[in-house]
Image (cartoon, rainbow, N blue to C red):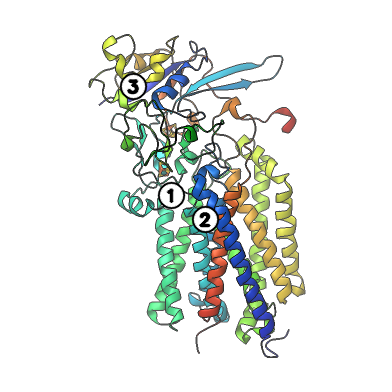
Amino acid sequence: MSIITHAPDQASISRISNLRLGVGIAGLIAGLAAGIGLLSGGHATFNTSSLLTWGLPVSTYVFFVLTSTGLTFVASLAMVFGMKDFYPIAKRCVWGAVVTLIIGFISLGLEIGNPLRMLWVIPTNMAVSSPMWWMGLFYLTYAILLVWKFHLINQGDWDSSQSRIIGIASFVAVIFAHATLGSVFGMMSMRPFWYGPMVPVYFLITAFLSGLAFIMLFINLDYGVNHANMSEGAARAMSRQLPAIFGVVLGLVIVFTLAKTMTGLWSNVPENKIVTQYIASSALFQFELWIGMVLPFIMMLSSKRHEATTQVVAGGLVIVALFIGRYEYVVGGQLIPMFKGAWADDLIAYAPSITEIGIIILAISVGILLYALGDKKLNLSDSPRK
Amino acid sequence: MARWGMVIDLAKCTGCQACSTACQMENNRLPGENYQDVLYYTERAQPTPVLKWFPRPCMHCEEPSCMHVCPTKATFKTEDGVVLVDWNKCIGCKYCMIACPYGVRFYTDEKPTIEPNVKDVFPGTGDLSWNPPYKGPQQDNAHGVGIQPHGVVSKCTFCYHKISKAPKGTPDLSNDNPALREFVPACVRTCAPTARYFGDIDNPNSEVSRLISDRKGVRLLEHTGNKPQVYYLGESGAVPGFSRPDNKS
Ligand code: SF4
Ligand code: SF4
């Protein structure tokens, strides 16, 4: 295995960085164009309805805030648990966590009816029986701590006791945040497809995988898909520990996915059985399982897992699989109409509208541009001097 | 304080939808926004199919899951047991719609169910999402009565603008007493075969209480624990489970 044998290949690094800027700007324009639909037609331009209420923007929100969770977990390996090899990628992870959180919030903010009203009605009404209220509280706390932590390490303060405490606090806050997000779905006993105490655990583990997949894809891209362009420490983390952790977590998620699918197919409850049958027989699910999870798992078992190219492919596939999985989960819980009788005699048909797709393109493009900005201005490869 | 509830006698109900129409008129509902609806179910297949129907308002649950999940307390329960939405507080997160097992909540800004879009024909001004030429109840955003503003969720109010004005201590609001007719919810008032009753279910002497106990009133989807305050009488008060049409299962 080669570790820093020659000077970084600046040409390929800047090619990728320019490509990223280009994609970000193009996406922003496309997203804004589609977003105009939202300005003129409001949420009536969505394909969601009173039968199926939460669609693509909500599943995108779930996907990105959980990715943020996962990136914070990886950063915490160094900053909370002292695994020093992870320091060289920690700052990138924290910035990535900030950016993915922003993507999630944009996606949600454009989905709900009166987002600004949230700012005062949520804190003044203390609706403590609502899982969503707790989710808001913990994600807000997490967001503040995360930005604070980034600010500290950006000033070179990695290890002061204040910096360590903020790091620990943001790690704890995000555990609660993702668990309450899990509860938003898992507590809904009237929707058996979602219901269950294991949902927060499922969210935890898929969040971790999501964070790892983002690192596999994006950090490798940042360095021109070549570990030799990284510092020695970063290259070591990327080629040795990360693929191993990624493989283990991916294996667990495959087990979870199979267990959920088998349980659903075996169950007699229509809301679980019929929906699982419907999802499992879709091409999207088959792609998610075999190409998006099993194939990357096999890649992680092979000796090529150390190589940047393998990691980029595996990371990219897992990201797509997780995105599909979030969508299936959020939409799946609503496919059987609540108490509609013959007015809706089959599963509800839903496919996102152009505006819904535009919103997520917009949110993701803002994220890409913020990340690119960070990459140019914030010295994301920094690590503690020692 | 009364605890308002409703009794629907399935043995009398003919499924005529007069209640739904009266509700649409009374509350300025748009097509598809059926605060009150009659749902049809078929049970079993040929040669012994059974057609069932349930007139379905909001159940004004004793334990309303819609209220428990609301992150802003926009959905609340009045002292007299009615579940309402405060449109001044609703952020339009739609979590209540996710959590209501009876599917009786509606978001303002949705694709129209028929063309032309009635909202475009009578465009709203200011805060109102549309502006019908005839407006029923007086606008009362804090109780979710009237025309919705944009971005909020609405639902059946048990005609709160009527029942809240009834004289205190009234056991039943029924057409039988001309002095009370103005306070009777529109669906109850219009039901030709008098299949609907409305009254104080905490008062053991009210007609609704007596009907529930004498005729063993049932609540729909009891397993959800929401404990509706709408009771059904008659032989067919259970909802068939969901199944897909044969060619798709
Ligand atoms: S029926 Fe639904 S909307 Fe009505 S009170 Fe019960 S949970 Fe809430
Ligand atoms: S949509 Fe409005 S009423 Fe419903 S849960 Fe959200 S804030 Fe509460």
Q: Amino acid at mark 2?
A: Ser
Per the model, the C-alpha gap separating discs 3 and 2 is 45 Å
**Badge 1 density bin: few <14, some 14–19, many ≥20, Cα 10 Å:** many
Q: Which mark is residue A107?
A: 2
Subunit bearing disc 2: A
Query: SS of the residue at dot 3?
Result: loop
Residue that label 3 marks: B201
Residue B105 in picture, x, y percent from top left = 46, 34
Q: Indicate the quadrant where residue B159 lies.
A: top left
Q: Which mark is residue A131?
A: 1
The quadrant the N terminus of chain A occupies is bottom right
Subunit bearing disc 1: A
Tag nearer the camera, 3 or 2: 2
Instruction: Find out if the beta carbon at label 2 lies less than 8 Å from the nearest ligand 2 atom.
Output: no
The residue located at (40%, 67%) in the rendering is A144
Query: SS of the residue at dot 2?
Result: helix
Query: SS of the residue at dot 1?
Result: helix
